Amino acid sequence: KTRVYKFGNKVADGDSTMRNLLGGKGANLAEMSKIGIPVPPGFTITTEVCTEYNELGREAVVQMIKGDVEAAIENIEQIMNAKFGDKDNPLLISVRSGARVSMPGMMDTVLNLGLNDDVVLGLAEKTKNERFAWDSYRRFIQMYGGVVLGMKPESKEDIDPFEEIMEHLKEKRDIELDTEFSIQDLKDLVYDFKDAVKKRTGHDFPTDPWDQLWGAVMAVFNSWNGDRAVYYRNMNGYPADWGTAVNVQAMVYGNMGDNSGTGVCFTRDAGTGENMFNGEYLINAQGEDVVAGVRTPQQITKIGSKRWAELAKIEEDERAEKYPSLEELMPAIFNELNEYQDKLEKHYRDMQDMEFTIQEGKLWILQTRNGKRTGAAMVKIAKDLLDEGLISEEEAVMSIEPNKLDELLHPVFDPKALKSSNVIAQGLPASPGAATGKIVFFADEADKYKSSILVRIETSPEDLEGMNIAKGILTARGGMTSHAAVVARGMGKCCVSGAGALKIDYKKRTLVVDGKEFHEGDWLSLNGSTGNIIEGKVATVEPDLSGEFAEIMKLADKFSSMQVRTNADSPKDAKVARSFGAQGIGLTRTEHMFFEVDRIKAMREMILADTVKGRKEALKELLPMQREDFEGIFEAMQGLPVTVRLLDPPLHEFVPHQLATQKDLAEEMHITLEAVKSKVSELEEFNPMLGHRGCRLGITYPEITEMQTRAILEAALNLKERGIETIPEIMIPLIGTVAEFENQEAVIRATANEVFEERGATVKYLVGTMIEIPRAALLADKIAEKADFFSFGTNDLTQMTFGYSRDDAGKFLPIYLKRGILKVDPFEVLDRDGVGQLVQLGTQRGRSTKENLKVGICGEHGGEPSSVEFCYETGMNYVSCSPYRVPIARLAAAQAAI
Ligand code: ADP
Ligand code: MG
Ligand code: MG
């Protein structure tokens, strides 16, 4: 087994296909060496060694790779014509981490390794540059101290212990920049740094270069299990056994004076995708100086430099003199860099993010990787690369992360305005978008201001209307599947949920964050894509969905064989979804229509009625409203299929729980307050989600099913008269037995016949069911004998298969995820192992008795890419998701098919 892979001098043991073994950085360093890009020579210790280190420990691993590492160092020495640890002709090296995926800033790197009190003198002598030698030495002690010796800030209020020493000296010398230190200052710093190490750790700073090397290698291995890296890994679902590789590489020096420097660059704009080479650099600097912002970095290209100066309000004269571009300052180097960026992008066939260093007029490339980018840039770059003939249509579709499309669909904060904004707290990015408005604390006051942000501890179904009116929703409690989050995503409304730092006082109408008090009417802004809560008003801009976005979506549809429908409860939602390319409605939740002010009243009367007669009267009031809704939805969908689910939620969600509203209702209905109260408490259930809901309502109160069927079919008939063909699909919720289905189907068919007879006309309609109770999945073959279609309701199916109440899971799911008991939230990503079995089994059994049974999914999972892939593999006809997730599902469906 090879554990050490060499690269440099236009050859390499590895290549870019070996990222799992060599890490992304190592694989690309090898590849660049091979294709003739000037890369400082070095070697990569594999990720497998990291795993071995975790199992066997330091001594065993050193024994295992010592010979290989010594040989690889010798190889560098030969190429660089210098010697590691030598006083007169020293070779210095960097020790860099590098996992298979890039984890920016999560792990550690040490530069200038190999220096000690003797070597620094030799380096000064050899380079005839004493300042450079001591600058490198102080940087080395600083980095090694931090990464290997644990010299980190002692508390979160403290700054880095070395920075603190430097700040003191700057004050004493009355200087601002690192570059202003005198040689003597740098020597003093080295002394003080070492002193600080001795004081804090009790040990002298290691002087033997080989000790330093092994210390750094082990520190990089350890950084894989550091807090930051573990958090990042968990967040992205990267397993612990991937490990990190270690790259050891000859140093090149950007800090040797005014003909040296360092920088980072992108082959295209990572924010917009524009095909424009861009980046930043600093003269006489090393490593992270550019990113860390020790000085104002300069732009690589002249155009970039001018654009930058304009934003920074710097006059052209001053720009050209103080902040010239690399293109202007070092034209030859710029041309060479420009050549490499072009070559690398063509070679990797994707936008590259590169690091480079200039040492005394010679250019070195230190890293290249596929650059991270915004959703907008992702789409534009895919389309451009396709047009440029660099990638195929399939590759263009595959290159887009479906979830990233979300960013494109909602109004966005003006990036300029965002720069000067103040983030007061963070919650979960529950529903993307940018919202700005005045704080209200009660849903029924959402219309108090033209733009409002509804701030709640949590929301309930009663808040629906207010949520719809508000520009954004902010909750202190609840996760990504909380009521607020689910409803907001459905509405395409910006929502930040579960912001624990908020202290909301409904009585005082105040919101306190970190000691700062906000009042009703104060401006607040929410970034639903990041979870940021921002003080004040931030300007937004509408997204543009034409152009590349439209073309990429068209391309996706070319490959996908599974349809994408939407969950829509109103004509408005239906229209939005159609504009995003929905091919039908997979779920209309009829109950959402009842929450509007004038309807909830009739609904409550229906619920509170004691007799069938009373109920029927109230239902009669509801009928025209429902019919009107369905007409609007059918019309919006223009002949595309529409699935309507009959009433599903427990009735207690509709009745008033506040005294004032109860009094109003009693008055209107001419009954006593006591009667209202007793009915409300009668409806209370111990376990409403397993209680009187779903088809159990229609079975106990068939007149509800009758009214809804009538509304659906009359609406379809009305449209038919206007020349619009509709085939309504009536869906019975929550069945667990065949008999339940048969019972409701009979009511539906009888009502249909009645309606058709009355009208002297007919329409085609289907009667199908949701499969959301495990028993229904098991008996799918029997059910399919009767049902025209299946729609897997994976929210309830997940709830019932796991036995996790969706509304209470927020209490333990986060802990499960943190401890690794669950890898992902099963309400977000469909659980293939368990719930998935029921879905597959239900589909197979269903189709065993009805070969062409139409099968779809309508849970939240229908818009989640990996779940969409699963649905494709299961052979579903369609997935259905909230309007704003339609493009995501379309893309995911295409990717599943490619
Ligand atoms: P990260 O993965 O956090 O970017 P890197 O290993 O890329 O860390 O290194 C951090 C910085 O040090 C980068 O700016 C890189 O270019 C620079 N660097 C790394 N190795 C060398 C080297 N051998 N010579 C000069 N600069 C280096
Ligand atoms: Mg890097
Ligand atoms: Mg359900």
Image (cartoon, grey):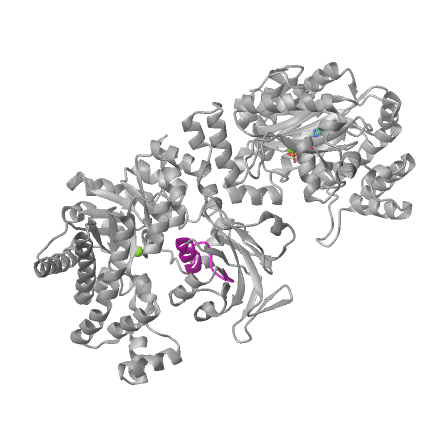
Is residue 738 shown above or below 179?
A: below
Foreground residue among 650 and 470: 470
Residue 227 located left or right of residue 130 = left
Q: Is residue 687 visible?
A: no
Residue 840 located left or right of residue 325 = left
Foreground residue among 886 and 87: 886
Q: How many marks?
A: 0
The quadrant of the picture showing ligand 1 is: top right
Asked if residue 768 is among those painted magenta in the image, a careful observer would answer no
**Which residue appears at 22% of the width and 65% of the height?**
624
Is residue 342 shown above or below 176?
A: above
x, y (%) of residue 487?
A: 40, 57
Which quadrant of the rendered structure holds the N terminus? top right
x, y (%) of residue 379?
A: 48, 36
**Which residue appears at 24% of the width and 59% of the height?**
646
x, y (%) of residue 878?
A: 29, 42
Is residue 657 shown above or below 235?
A: below
**Which residue appears at 77% of the width and 27% of the height?**
253
x, y (%) of residue 544?
A: 47, 44
Residue 490 located left or right of residue 272 = left
Foreground residue among 270 and 72: 270
Asked if residue 482 is among those painted magenta in the image, a careful observer would answer yes
Which quadrant of the rendered structure holds the C terminus? top left
What segment is highlighted magenta in the picture?
Answer: 474-491
Q: Quadrant of residue 203?
A: top right
Foreground residue among 533 and 413: 413
Q: Quadrant of residue 232?
A: top right
Q: Is residue 574 visible?
A: yes
